[in-house]
Amino acid sequence: MHPRGVEGLRSLRWLREHWRVSLLLLSALFAGCDRAGPIGFRDGSPLEDLPHWIRPVLDSGVRPDWSADGRRLVYLDALVGNAYELELATGVRRSLTSHFPHHGFTRIRYLANGDFLLCGPSAPTEEGAVGAGDRWHTELFFLGSEGEGGAQSLNEPCFEGPATSRIDMKIAWTRSDYPEELVFARSEIWTGRIVVDDGRAQLVDRRRRVGREDFYYLAFLETQDFRPPNDQELLFTAYAYKGGEVMGVDLETGSLTNYSRDWGYDEAEGVFPEGKTIAIEREADTYTAVPVGDIDIWELALDGSARAIRLTNFTDYAGFGANNPVVSPDGKKMVFGLRIKGGEHGNAKGMLLYDLEAARQADSGPFAKAAAEAEQLR
C-alpha cells in the first residue's frame, strides 16, 4: 500500500475512535470569522464602471473553455443545460448538443484533438423536465467536434468539473459520494485516457491519484487543470480544507503541494499557459467550509510562495462577484463570469473578456497596484 494510504487508514481509525473530537473539528471548519476589508460598499453593477481592460462578451452563459487556437469558446447556457461554441471574432455561435436528447450538461471542455469532453446527468430529476438533470449525479460523455451522433457515455461518474490535457487525450475527474454522505464520504481524483476508434470512444488506463484520506477526511476534492508545459502535475481544489486550498499532485511521485497556504476560501480555476500561475476564485478573509459568496478572481503563484494578485474587484458592488476564470492558450486574455451573490454555486449573469496585457500596462491596473504594495513592504 502507498505510504499515504497507510497514513489515511490511521487517520480514519483515529476519527472513528475519537468521534466527539472529530465533530468539534468539523464544527470549527464551519465557524465563520469577520471578513476584513470593505465588501459591497458600492451600489449598482460592476458592468456600469468596467476598467478599459474588461468588456462583456455574452449576456448569458456559464462554464467557458478556450479552444487550442484561442479563437473560440465553448460554454453552457445554464448550470444544467445545452453546450454552445462561440467564434470570438464574428460573434457567431453554434449549438453542440441541442440536436440530440439528453438531460442537460454541467461541463464542456475541449480535448487535445478538438473533440469535446462533457459532464452531465444520465437521468432527469424527479420532475422529469427536459434538460433538468441532477448536477450532483453526473457522468462523463464524449462528443465529436462536429457533434455527429450525439454524446457517447464513457461509463464513468464525475463530480463537478473534469480536467483535459492540451498535449494528449489524457483527462482527470473526481468520484464523489457528495451530497448523500459527508463525514466519511468518498472523494477521489482519477486520471485516464480517451481512445477513439472508428468514431467510438473509450476511457482507458484509469488510475486513482488522490483521496480524502490524504486530508484526514476534512476535504472534498475537485480536479481543475493539468499544469503546463509537461502535464506532470494535476492542479485541484481541496474544499473545506483550511477553508479551501489550491493543491497539486505530482503524477509521477504522488507528492502533494499546497499552493494557497492560508485559511481563506480558494478554488483552483484556469491555469496560465506557462504553468507558473493559476487564476483562482478567492473569498478573502473568510474562514468557512462553504464560502459566503463574496468571490473575486486572483492570480496565484505556483512557486510555493502563496503570492497572489487580485484581478477583479466586483465584490465592491453589493450582490456581485466574479467567477470561473479561464485563461487563453497564449496567456493574453481571460474569460470569466459575472457572479450573482446568493445564486447557485457556479452561477453567472453573462461572461466577460479580460485583456491581461492591457491590465499589465495600465498605471492604475491590478499589477501596478500589486507592485506598489510590494515596494512598500521592502
Image (cartoon, grey):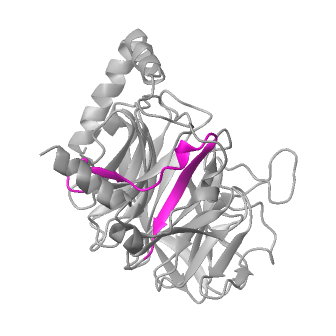
- Residue 66's place in the image compared with 26, above or below, is below
- Residue 239's place in the image compared with 161, above or below, is above
Q: Looking at the rendering, in which quadrant would you find the N terminus?
A: top left
Find out whether residue 248 is within the magenta segment. no
Horizontally, residue 74 falls left or right of residue 252, namely: right
Horizontally, residue 342 falls left or right of residue 292, namely: right
Residue at the spot 58% in from the left edge and 58% down from the top edge: 49
Residue at the spot 71% in from the left edge and 81% down from the top edge: 93
Residue at the spot 44% in from the left edge and 31% down from the top edge: 286
Horizontally, residue 112 falls left or right of residue 228, namely: right
Residue 256 in view (yes/no) = no
> Which residue is nearer to you in this view: 97 or 245?
245
Q: What is the x, y in percent for residue 167?
A: 37, 79
Give the mark count.
0
Horizontally, residue 304 falls left or right of residue 95, namely: left
Q: What is the x, y in percent for residue 23?
A: 45, 15
Q: What segment carries the magenta color? A: 302-328
Residue 146 in view (yes/no) = yes
Q: What is the x, y in percent for residue 333?
A: 45, 73
- Residue 239's place in the image compared with 67, above or below, is above
Q: What is the x, y in percent for residue 201?
A: 57, 78
Q: Which image quadrant for residue 360?
A: bottom left
> Which residue is nearer to you in this view: 211 or 90?
90
> Which residue is nearer to you in this view: 169 or 279?
279
